[in-house]
Amino acid sequence: MPKPGRHGSREPDGRRKGTRVKRISHWIGGKVVPGASGRSGPVWDPATGERQAEVDLASAAEVDRAVAVAADAFPAWRATSLSRRAEIMFRAREIISAHGEEIAALVSAEHGKVPSDALGEVSRGLENVEYASGIPNLLKGGYSEQAATGLDVHSVRQPLGVVAGVTPFNFPAMVPMWMLANALACGNTFVLKPSERDPSASMFLAELLKRAGLPDGCFNVLHGDRTAVERILEHPGVAAVSFVGSTPVARHVYEAGTRNGKRVQALGGAKNHMLVLPDADLDLAADAAVSAAYGSAGERCMAISVVLAMDAVADDLVARIRDRIPGIAVGAAGEPGSEMGPLITAEHRDRVAGYLAGAADEGATLVVDGREDVPSAGFFLKPSLIDHVKPGMRCYDEEIFGPVLTVVRIGDYTEGLRLIDDNPYGNGAAIFTRDGGAARRFEFDVQAGMVGVNVPIPTPVSYYSFGGWKASLFGDQHIYGPEGVNFYTRTKVVTSRWPDPATSSVDLGFPRTR
């Protein structure tokens, strides 16, 4: 495999000789704040292997400062009218949309995904800002007049306070918008800890929110690593934490956060299966499998990683998938025609490649080897296809998170459903068939949070909620949409009586409503 820093004249840290590396700092209280910890991390250009920036890594004390700023901003923001909050969300939607290509360019530069993919990410994130613009309707409570004689009851939804988000590298613009839009619209203030691998999109979002009229201190961006996350999880001033990442980390975030009295939603990993029945349109299924497996270099928690192919059509389906792979243009985001870019780091690329190296030894068939003929620079791995995979093999049991599609051959629907339900992950599952009865049965039976029917597990639209089952989600609430509003608010029930002195008396009995 090609290694970073092996092409051209390089400094030991991967920079081209003579070049300076920009520094990415925090956003606290409405302005850029240089890091004070003395620690920083590299931000690579995945297409070249060059170090393009240094990002400050926060200390626990810097986390405390960001939370304190957010806490100071909370009372005024919480008291801001719903109409004003909605107005700011509307304006944010327009400003973010106007700068969508700039955000996408930052994503492409640091993550490596191609411009069309990055623009799609911005668009899907923006849907959540649009949804949050309707917050006056979303926060309506209930009112019951005369619940008992002279007694009325009503409920309201109120914000939690300072909330935090910890977001992954694979969607550096979209996932923050999944969290911040509802959180802010509901009246909370927010501290975002984005991935330190591609931090610039979050900084630009912070600037755009300020332009939209969001008061200083309501949205803060704090870069960091485990030190910052652990402090967020234990900080007494943080009321809730929303997390998206791998399952082991999601489990830790959930356990540590709840142990410290926080509300937590922690979305973990995935092993999404696509069940193809014999009556399916095989060209449609092959197109869907290729698109969903290799888009964004497979670095999506919604990627299809396993095709469950019925024996009767398995050979044909594998051939159709194999024949489509050479047509995928792999290259840097800036190269015309590129459809799939590099992986995020050299270490991640090498880890993904390790599944290909071990597939044959475990009895699988490596149909397409993505390690062959890769660009000499950058962190590239081409699309790969592994057939005759079985449970117990590493490439089946583990989340690969790269451009590797595995095929498991099955005898019937029941076997396919059992494999999906036995898998510890439950993010999503898809079925491809022309049989409406089979599709409805699958929708009813399958143990997964998101289901596609002749669609390879789409991310739900913003007015539904995103989230898996089993080891793909820790917590009771899915992210964004209606459940996002639930997560970022708590209900208060008010029981009131305006007493008539003539009917007042002492009564030590348990209150009755009759």
Image (tube, grey):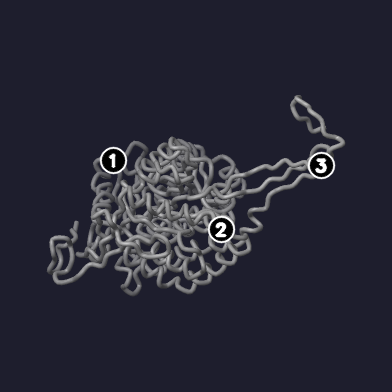
Residue 183 horizontal/vertical position (percent): 52, 54
Residue 77 horizontal/vertical position (percent): 54, 58
Disc sitting over residue 201 in the figure: none
For label 1, the SS is loop
Rate crowding at label 1 as few (under 14), some (14 to 19) or many (20 or more) other CA atoms within 10 Å.
few
Query: Up-down: is 338 above or below 405?
Result: below
The amino acid pointed to by label 2 is Ala
For label 3, the SS is strand
Query: Up-down: is 186 above or below 398?
Result: below
Disc sitting over residue 146 in the figure: 3
For label 2, the SS is helix
Could you give the CA–CA distance between mark 1 and mark 3, rounded to whole angstroms?
71 Å
Q: Nearer the viewer, mark 1 or mark 2?
A: 2
Pick whichever of labels 1 and 2 is earlier in the sequence.
2
Residue 86 horizontal/vertical position (percent): 60, 63
Residue 415 horizontal/vertical position (percent): 47, 37
The amino acid pointed to by label 3 is Gln
Can residue 235 be seen at all in this image of the molecule?
yes
Q: Which residue is mark 1?
A: 363
